Image (cartoon, helix red, strand yellow):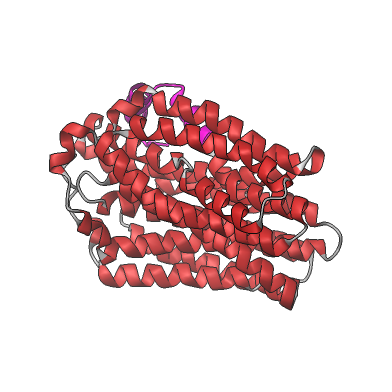
Amino acid sequence: MFHTRSSRSELIRHAGFSYFPLAFIARLPFAMMTVGVLTLVVAERGSVTLGGLNSAAAGIGTALAGPLLGAAADRFGQRRVLVPVGLVNAALLGAFPFVVGSSASALALLALSVLIGASAPQIAPMSRTRLVAIIKRSIRRDRREKVLNGTMAYESAADETVFIVGPFLVGLLATAIAPWVAIAGASALTLVFVTWFALHPTGRLDPSTPHTTAQQAPARELARFSLLTVVAGTLGIGFFFGATLTSLTGFLADGGDGDRAGLLYGVMGIGSAALALGSAAFPERFSLRARWLVFGSLMLAAAIVYATARSELTLVVALAVLGCGIGPTLVSQYSLAAQLSPLGRSATTMTMLGSAVVVGQAVSSAVTGVVVDRLGSGTGLAVPAIAAAFVVAAAVAHAAATPRVDQQPEPVPA
């Protein structure tokens, strides 16, 4: 994964052997949140529209609070932020099934969904921040770029897997036991594994601790156009996730097989995770912005095939090709974000990207659900192509704004 055995061993030694499985499990509740809220509200209240609104509300909460939590982690350290936030989120998730099953108003449900999204611990961006800090402090400068690209490849593959496994777990638990079990499970996972992750020794390796706050770049540097185009690109990936899962569910539901959507969706995850890991082996001359353009275009081409599919076999083939485009695209986006992150703002930058994915997924799920309900499942299959076009447009904007971003000197470690 990291090209050289010594570099890989050094990174694992500093992170600890338990770190990677812990960070993987701890990010599961985040991937289960929007789908779990949607599933439970639809099951208990019998309204797809209300369920979609609650899912979108959770995404809005994440959008509002995610970057603020990242900024707090940059200033005070991850432990001081993740422990209380994780406990609050676990309590809110635990209370949600009771509120949904009560006579509480729809407005109360929406308010609670916003709070759930706002308090969601974003483990993925926090993990990237920790690993980038380890690489900058522990890996020789001449090997640092390769190790960073390999690490971003692994992290993106882990995200891809989690965003496939999360909805699959929600569907499995809801079908096999009851819809509320998925939310209860997310609450338990948050309580145990997010707290464990927060207290892991790598929490002390975060470069953005209180004694370095004086070295932080101004917050206005987070609004640089080159970085915002990367955030827009990950937002497009979120749009794509939500549109694909919802449209696939609607299409299969027409034939009475809606509960199989998670299984077919997993086909996309296989290629995505594999290509994300494999992207670490791409030659350096194949620049990050070029990878984003190439694999984003592959996404768009496969999404057009997906939009015209009218058989399950065609859908499966399109999903497999889509996976091959998504993985390297996400790796490129996160690697670019690591390069463009302002000094001392790493956690903020990574949470901006993580929030964008979740917000995009939540909003797109709601919009695609309305399209399927009003215009039919065939029309719904076209929505992922629109999302893929958005990803490519963001890549073009980024390439135009930063023609030589990959040749920029590496920032001084915070």
Magenta span includes 380: no
**Vertical placement of 62 versus 175: above or below?**
below
Tell me which residue sits at (26%, 51%) in the image.
Answer: 341
Tell me which residue sits at (35%, 57%) in the image.
Answer: 288
User: What kind of secondary structure does the magenta stretch mostly adopt?
Assistant: helix
Residue 210 lies in what quarter of the image?
Answer: top left
Give the position of the C terminus as an image quadrant.
top left
**Vertical placement of 124 versus 354: above or below?**
above
In-image side of 131 versus 19 (left or right): left
Residue 31 lies in what quarter of the image?
Answer: top right
In-image side of 351 versus 389 (left or right): left
**Vertical placement of 413 versus 54: above or below?**
above
Instruction: Work out whether residue 215 or residue 140 is closer to the camera in this orientation and state it.
Output: 215
Which stretch appears magenta?
1-26
**Vertical placement of 330 versus 215: above or below?**
below
Tell me which residue sits at (46%, 67%) in the image.
Answer: 391
Instruction: Work out whether residue 83 or residue 312 is closer to the camera in this orientation and state it.
Output: 83
